[in-house]
């Protein structure tokens, strides 16, 4: 297994975004996501910015996993343009490759 590092990118009331990365992948962790207008707008801005940075340094996409019952986060990811790849170990896995034209 390839060792990874994990850093906190945003941590405030109702919105946490952490990045786990190594040479092979970049994964967003969303341990706390409370849907408010402010959090929605920030999420919709920050995730594309994170993606742009990660592709600039050589990653092809960013991924995230969510609980299949988490319909709010699922809708947010789909609105952002993330694609569900499938389910692994009971978690729905999504891939984000940036804004699709």
Image: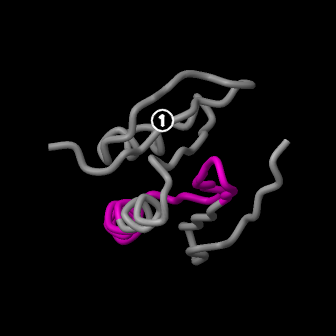
- Bounds of the magenta span? 20-48
Report x, y in % for residue 53: 42, 68
| Display coloring | one colour
Q: Image point 60% across, 39% down: which residue?
A: 66
Q: Image point 38% across, 40% down: which residue?
A: 82
Q: Image point 61% across, 48% down: which residue?
A: 25
Q: Quadrant of residue 3?
A: bottom right
Report x, y in % for residue 89: 74, 25
Report x, y in % for residue 98: 32, 50
**Disc 1, SS:** helix
Q: Quadrant of the N terminus?
A: top right
Up-down relation of residue 79 to residue 33 (above or below): above
Q: Quadrant of the C terminus?
A: top left
Up-down relation of residue 17 to residue 87 (above or below): below
Callout count: 1
Up-down relation of residue 15 to residue 89 (above or below): below
Left or right, 24 with reference to 78: right
Mark 1 neighbour density, 10 Å: few (under 14) some (14–19) many (20 or more)? few
Report x, y in % for residue 26: 59, 53
Nearest to the observer: residue 30 or residue 1: 1
Q: Image point 60% across, 40% down: which residue?
A: 65
Q: Quadrant of residue 31?
A: bottom right
The residue wearing badge 1 is 71
Up-down relation of residue 76 to residue 14 (above or below): above
* 64 drawn magenta: no
Left or right, 53 with reference to 37: right
Left or right, 78 with reference to 17: left
* 41 drawn magenta: yes
Nearest to the observer: residue 83 or residue 22: 22
């Amino acid at each position: 297994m390839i060792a990874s590092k994990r850093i906190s990118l945003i941590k405030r009331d109702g919105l946490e975004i952490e990045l786990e990365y190594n040479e092979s992948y970049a994964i967003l962790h969303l341990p706390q996501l409370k849907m408010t207008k402010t959090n929605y707008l920030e999420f919709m801005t920050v995730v594309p910015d994170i993606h742009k940075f990660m592709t600039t340094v050589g990653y092809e996409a960013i991924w995230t996993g969510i609980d299949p019952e988490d319909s709010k986060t699922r809708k947010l990811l789909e609105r952002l343009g993330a694609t569900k790849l499938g389910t692994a170990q009971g978690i729905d896995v999504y891939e984000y490759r940036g804004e699709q034209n």
